[in-house]
Image (cartoon, rainbow, N blue to C red):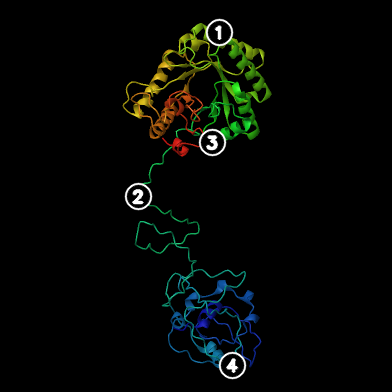
């Protein structure tokens, strides 16, 4: 179908005086008339740059005069000369045509033509055949005519507007079928890939770190005293599994060496020191003097407490003697400016009394089930020690914090019906750690390394360590983080 440019252009210029433009070749003047259909075609050689669009009176356009049937005519248009164009403009009567369309077709990307106010053709030029409706560009600062009320839609197919091609969305891994073509939205985000399989529940750490605390006796296998280098090397390994150590004495410079190792190596370890009182007052005084000197030499904040003795009531010491030692140590620390360090006794739960608890800052008890006369399972053994700690908390401690000074399981030897093996030791330490954390108890697990230095004692007494006597770990400590 051909759309005649002039039928639209002269319809816009009806009732308007057209200003003649200088012809490129020849001389012809078009006279503006009310009959917009008088001139139907305009040659394509018009010099549009010379058209004065500001002279067009768009408000005076008579849209009813447009011959719309000729606009959409599919017949081959005649070829006009400039003389015929003028003659037609002077003689053809007006015709009535349907009202113009209210919907303006989209212009073709390949052809567009402006509307002239004066045309002077220079030669006979056939009108090009457009593939879709071509509209003239809207002049600058021109008020367009009001939209007509009737519609005559053109039978042309508009050129689709290109849209950006989005990246394909991720395909769900569970579906073999391809997904439909994506719909582009500027702010769209990819859909997550999901699976229909339920994710397994992760095992949770019982608490921060591996063990709350370890007891540590630094003696060499032959019973001799280790040097500070050996202590440093061992504590560097200990610091990987706990943040607290318990010492039993100050002999062999063990407190001083531990403080130096922690300070110089910047280890995350707190020291819970001990004074040995089982050998009488002289030994107690010697340990106390060394404790004060070593603590003052290094950072005293590294020392988190001091235990006066270990299981001395179980060894036959009287309650009053033990209370006297506790009070003596506390008074001495206060006089030395170390009164901030907690002082307490450590005793088996069966021998801990309310009177001892009354003079202690912490109620520290040693509880084992490995020596019980009945064994049913490691789970039952763990429950037993927690219940016994609960008994101390509820009936002895008088509201003071209760802490395990020792508990553990040997990996060799025999203590009765309880099976002593590495597998049983691993099971006990795992289950105890979880149970203690759930019950809210701090503890020192017994012990850091196997105590081959305890010559002449039972194999079971020498085999409680989580490290061997050579300080090689006996099992994967990663197991300690799982409950």
**From the viewer's perspective, is residue 21 above or below residue 382?**
below
Mark closest to the chain's N terminus, 4 or 3:
4
Mark on residue 167? Answer: none
Q: Is residue 350 visible?
A: yes
For mark 4, give the secondary structure: loop
Mark on residue 197? Answer: 2
Measured in 3D between alpha carbons, the distance from the residue under mark 2 to the one under mark 1, in whole angstroms, is 66 Å
Measured in 3D between alpha carbons, the distance from the residue under mark 4 to the one under mark 2, in whole angstroms, is 80 Å
Residue under label 3, please give it: 240
Residue under label 4, please give it: 123
Q: Quadrant of residue 204?
A: top left
Q: Are marks 3 and 2 in contact (CB under 8 Å)?
A: no
Mark closest to the chain's N terminus, 4 or 2:
4
- Mark 3 or 2, closer to the camera: 3
Q: Nearer the viewer, residue 257 or 28?
A: 257
For mark 2, give the secondary structure: loop
Q: Nearer the viewer, residue 365 or 312?
A: 312
Q: Is residue 35 visible?
A: no
């Amino acid at each position: 179908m051909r759309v005649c440019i002039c039928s639209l252009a002269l319809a816009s210029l009806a009732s308007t005086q057209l200003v003649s433009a200088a012809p490129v070749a020849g001389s012809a003047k078009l006279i503006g008339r009310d009959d917009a259909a008088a001139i139907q075609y305009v040659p394509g050689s018009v010099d549009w740059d010379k058209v004065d669009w500001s002279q067009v009176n768009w408000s005076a356009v008579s849209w009813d005069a447009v011959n719309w049937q000729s606009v959409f005519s599919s017949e081959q248009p005649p070829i006009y000369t400039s003389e015929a164009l003028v003659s037609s403009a002077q003689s053809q009567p007006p015709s009535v045509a349907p009202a113009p369309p209210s919907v303006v077709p989209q212009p073709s990307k390949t052809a567009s033509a402006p509307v002239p106010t004066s045309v002077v053709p220079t030669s006979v030029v056939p009108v090009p055949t457009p593939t879709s409706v071509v509209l003239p560009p809207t002049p600058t600062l021109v008020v367009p005519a009001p939209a007509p009320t009737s519609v005559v839609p053109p039978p042309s197919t508009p050129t689709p507007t290109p849209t950006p091609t989005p990246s394909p969305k991720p395909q769900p891994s569970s579906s073999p079928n391809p997904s439909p073509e994506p719909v582009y939205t500027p702010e769209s985000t990819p859909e997550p890939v999901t699976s229909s399989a339920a994710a397994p529940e992760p095992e949770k750490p019982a608490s921060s770190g591996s063990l709350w605390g370890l007891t540590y006796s630094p003696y060499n296998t032959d019973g001799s005293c280790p040097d500070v280098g050996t202590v440093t090397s061992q504590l560097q390994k200990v610091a990987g599994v706990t943040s607290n150590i318990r010492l039993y004495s100050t002999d062999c410079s063990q407190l001083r060496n531990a403080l130096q190792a922690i300070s110089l190596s910047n280890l995350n370890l707190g020291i819970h020191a001990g004074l040995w009182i089982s050998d009488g007052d002289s030994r107690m005084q010697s340990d106390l003097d060394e404790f004060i000197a070593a603590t003052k030499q290094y950072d005293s904040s590294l020392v988190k407490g001091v235990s006066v003795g270990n299981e001395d009531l179980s060894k036959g010491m009287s309650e009053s003697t033990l209370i006297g030692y506790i009070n003596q140590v506390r008074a001495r620390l206060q006089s030395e400016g170390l009164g901030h360090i907690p002082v307490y006794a450590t005793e088996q739960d069966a021998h801990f009394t309310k009177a001892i608890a009354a003079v202690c800052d912490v109620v520290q008890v040693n509880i084992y089930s490995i020596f019980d006369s009945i064994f049913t399972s490691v789970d039952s053994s763990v429950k037993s020690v927690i219940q016994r700690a609960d008994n101390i908390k509820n009936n002895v401690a008088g509201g003071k914090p209760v802490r395990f000074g020792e508990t553990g399981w040997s990996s060799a030897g025999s203590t009765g019906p309880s099976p002593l093996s590495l597998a049983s030791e691993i099971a006990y330490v795992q289950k105890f750690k979880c149970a203690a954390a759930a019950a809210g108890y701090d503890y020192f697990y017994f012990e850091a390394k196997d105590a081959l230095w305890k010559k002449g004692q039972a194999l079971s007494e020498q085999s409680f360590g989580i490290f061997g006597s050579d300080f090689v770990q006996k099992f994967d400590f990663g197991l300690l983080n799982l409950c």
